[in-house]
Amino acid sequence: MDVSLLHDIAPFSTEQRAMRILLVDDDEPMVELSATFLERELADAETATYTDPEPALDELTDGGYDCVVSDYDMPGMDGLELLTAAREQGIEIPFVLFTGKGSEEIASRAISAGVDEYLQKGGPEEYPVLANKVSNLVEKYWAETHMRRGFLAIESAEEGIGIIDGDGVYQYMNKAYAALYDRDRTELIGEHWDILYPDDEARRFHEEILPQLEAEGSWRGFSTGVTKDGEAVPERLVLTQMDDGGHVCIVQELTEVDALQAEVELKDRVLDAIGVGIVVTDPSQDDNPIVYCNEAFEALTGYDAESVTGRNCRFLQGPEKDPETVAEIRAALDAGESISTEIRNYDVDGEPFWNRLDIHPVRDDDGALECFVGFQRVGDRDGDADDADSP
């Protein structure tokens, strides 16, 4: 996986803490001097010093350290033997061999043993170099540790999480992502995302979803994928754009409530497409205000959802109200009944139009009135819907 694709994702940890350094050297004045210099050069450093490698190894196994700085030539256990023993116990923190007994042979052995840095002791001028190497190693170790923890969380997440590059090809996905479509991720990484969608849904992604993602930086909503065997997978999808043109996908299979909402949104898109304006009003609130309108209503009247929410629909009647029709509508609403009629309305520019209006009450399982739904189309004075705006 190309780790550069993750640069736009929030870091897995913003932890700020002191770096803890364990120094091991059988020369006590030398190890204390090294600790003093490192704490002076590194503002956030905390050091612990040992002159005997054996207790130093015991201390390391308790964890909590970010780096080891060890001499090479020590009685009982040299620096490379300490490194080997630490690695055998699963201690993977950076290890710096800081030795006064340098030679090509020791340097070669140190590299073969896997030390992270090899540095010969010298005068005080060597300590800024040592401090810089320790700082770089610890920062790299922290970053890799946070990355590993983050990917462990991603791998164990119940949600499907995937990364798609700028060409639409999967570069990474966790097991949950592939399992949602009854596939193994080895089948999908390297494939284009449209392998998981039927043709009509892939078309909606290209024409509607991806342009919105590019324009706004994110998209969330409902979609329908498909398993290898052709079974439909209703899903909730969240997409987040990355600077390189790719995007992060988070996908969940829909619950029953989600599926109902997705069905409503689908029907809403259909009604938008055929030009039927919809408003929902709440009779439990004062003056039965609008609580929802669809895009077709906005197109019909010129008013956006924000400007009409909380207002009674009568604002559309303008200055020349039709008292008889208004009274007829009000009587039906007061009785909680349906009504179909035609009324002169005015759009946002004050232009009149005949509105073919159908209002229906919506009740709960106990018969209590929950809301009214109004369907609106351009009509004519004879009460017939305009053919150009009819389904």
Image (spheres, rainbow, N blue to C red):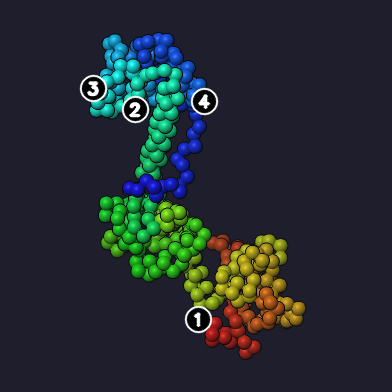
**Mark 3 lies on residue:** 105
Q: Mark 4 and 3 residues: CB-CB less than 8 Å, in contact?
A: no
**Mark 1 lies on residue:** 391
Q: Mark 2 and 1 residues: CB-CB less than 8 Å, in contact?
A: no
390 sits left or right of 53 in the view: right
Q: Counting residues from the N terminus, which is met first, the one under dot 4 or under dot 3?
A: 4
Judge the density around disc 1: few (<14), some (14-19), many (≥20) Cα neighbours within 10 Å.
few
In space, the residues marked 2 and 4 are separated at their CA atoms by 21 Å
Residue positioned 27% across, 51% down in the render? 186
Outermost residue toward the bottom in this view: 382
In space, the residues marked 4 and 3 are separated at their CA atoms by 35 Å
Q: Report the amino acid beneath label 1.
A: Pro
Judge the density around disc 3: few (<14), some (14-19), many (≥20) Cα neighbours within 10 Å.
few
SS type, badge 3: helix
Q: Report the amino acid beneath label 2.
A: Glu
**Mark 2 lies on residue:** 117
**2 or 1: mark nearer the eye:** 2
Q: Report the amino acid beneath label 4.
A: Ala
Judge the density around disc 4: few (<14), some (14-19), many (≥20) Cα neighbours within 10 Å.
few
Residue positioned 42% across, 26% down in the render? 129
Of residues 327 and 319, the one nearer the viewer is: 319
Residue positioned 39% across, 58% down in the render? 166
Q: Counting residues from the N terminus, which is met first, the one under dot 2 or under dot 4?
A: 4
SS type, badge 4: loop
In space, the residues marked 2 and 1 are separated at their CA atoms by 75 Å
**4 or 3: mark nearer the eye:** 3
Residue 253 figure quarter: bottom left
Q: Mark 1 and 4 residues: CB-CB less than 8 Å, in contact?
A: no
Tell me residue 332's x, y (percent). Answer: 66, 74
40 sits left or right of 195 in the view: right
SS type, badge 1: loop
